[in-house]
Amino acid sequence: MKRNVQQSKFMKRSKVPDYKDKRVFGVPPIINVQRTGQPLPQSIQQAMRYLRSQCLEKVGIFRKSGVKSRIQALRQLNDNSPDHVTYQGQSAYDVADLLKQYFRDLPEPILTSKLTHTFLHIYQFVPKPQRFHAVQCAVFLLPDENREVLQTLIYFLSDISTAEENQMTAHTLAVCLAPSILHLNTSKRDATSHGLISKKGRAKPDHKDLSENTAATECLSHMITECKKLFQIPQEMMLQACSSYVLADSQPLPLHALGVNRRGERVDYCVYLEDNVQCLLRDMAEKSKGWHSVAGPPHTELAYKKVGDGHPIRLWRASVEIEAPPTVVLHRVLRERHLWDEDLLHSRVIENLENNTEVCVSLRLCGEKFNNSLQKEDGDPAHGISEDDEEESLSDGNFQVKVRLSGRLGRFPDGVEHTGVGEDDQEERKQVQA
């Protein structure tokens, strides 16, 4: 008796793309996060800042084409020397076309290949009264890094559309940008893009293509118009989250129950800040133990140490010499952040508390996020200390994510400044810009 034995075939492992030879264009947001901590390259953020601050009045921006040779030169500069890119004196239309190329050349649409069809279907089949809630829910399904890039882009386009001088409404911008952002009608993409690409060689788009292009334009235009509400958590979703046992431990703490001291005891914010000040003073000592030096940027001493709190996150310390009195340095850091932080859009003090402590809020460019911080300034002339404990929230400031970032700043009388910031362990060998 003969038996037919069928041997199982091993599945071919898909090849992971290699982005080592790419720095800006063609690099997905998740790779940017792994490299720099931000999903959008600094040079692309800089292009948005340039257009927003100096080119809002340019008629037909994103509609009129730039000069191909100049655009190519800017692109090469971004890919070869992204840390030395400057757009001063450049044509607004060249920079605008550069931005369109950046989003068009991403490996997949910023809405992701899986969800782009969902966004299009919302504007093809969902009744108008339910569209906003549907697209809002779809936005929350995006990966964090994609949603942050989308929010930065949509807020930027909203600023462009509100400048009447350029004659570019939200709808006009959507007509010009939707094909690049959603990767429509791009024949160079392969067939894995969920049918969003017109067939190569087709003379005219069919009904499906026209329907998808119309839906894409309506989608992007609606996002731009409703950007202030789009990235807010709906009230009903917040109520569901509050009653969920999964998020029971993620509710924001009241001020009096802010922290835990080094012995693991729950303490109020005054004791919490003082405990961190004493910890920082010990870390500032020249003979402090446990620090491991690593190569850093020029004129900067960089070191890290493991923290025994059970979390796989290391504490990083950067030391730089500043030729200025300590009081001037501290004033520049706390009160004049807009002079050195290009990503800062707005900041203000919400409330002054006792013992030189204050609650502040700041709005940053990338992701348009509010950072709520509790700051304490120590008036000791020998050890100037500033404590800054931040919690990031979405644009309305109502929903606070679980990740807390703590920053500490100390200054020696001789002008040497030390900062300590928590960084993920996988960033250990990355050069951290001071």
Image (spheres, rainbow, N blue to C red):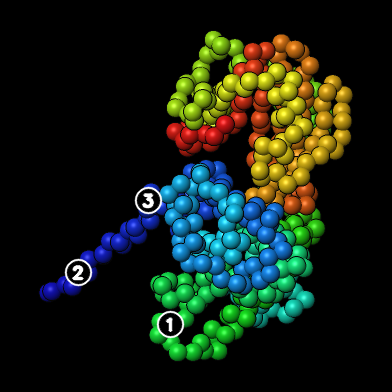
Residue 120's x, y, as percent? 61, 75
Tell me if residue 368 can be seen. yes
Query: Element type at marker 1?
Result: loop
Q: Secondary structure at mark 2?
A: loop
**Sequence-earlier tag: 2 or 3:** 2
Q: Label 1: which residue?
A: 199
Categorize mark 3 by other alpha carbons within 10 Å: few (<14), some (14-19), many (20+): few
Image quarter of residue 316: top right
Out of 335 and 66, give the one closest to the viewer: 66
Q: Is residue 120 above or below residue 203?
A: above
Residue 350 percent across, percent down from the top left: 85, 38
Q: CA distance from mark 2 to mark 3?
A: 46 Å
Crowd band around label 2 with a 10 angstrom C-alpha radius: few (<14), some (14–19), many (20+) = few
Q: Give residue 42's position: percent from left, percent from top.
A: 56, 48
Q: Position of residue 217 (x, y in %)?
A: 64, 76
Mark before the other along the chain sequence, 1 or 3? 3
Q: Which mark identifies residue 337?
A: none
Q: Which residue is mark 2?
A: 5
Q: CA distance from mark 1 to mark 2?
A: 42 Å
Residue type at mark 3: give it: Asp
Q: Quadrant of the image for the N terminus?
A: bottom left
Look at the picture and state if 283 lies above or below 401.
above
Amino acid type at image mark 1: Lys
Tag 3, which secondary structure? loop
Circle 2: residue type: Val
1 and 3 marks in contact (CB < 8 Å): no
Answer with mark 1 or mark 2, whichever residue precedes in sequence.
2
Q: CA distance from mark 1 to mark 3?
A: 30 Å
| Residue depth check, mark 1 versus mark 3: number of the one nearer the observer | 3
Which residue is found at the position 47% from the left and 71% from the top? 193
- Mark 1: few/some/many CA within 10 Å (<14, 14-19, 20+): some
Which residue, given by chain and number where applicable, does mark 3 sit on? 21
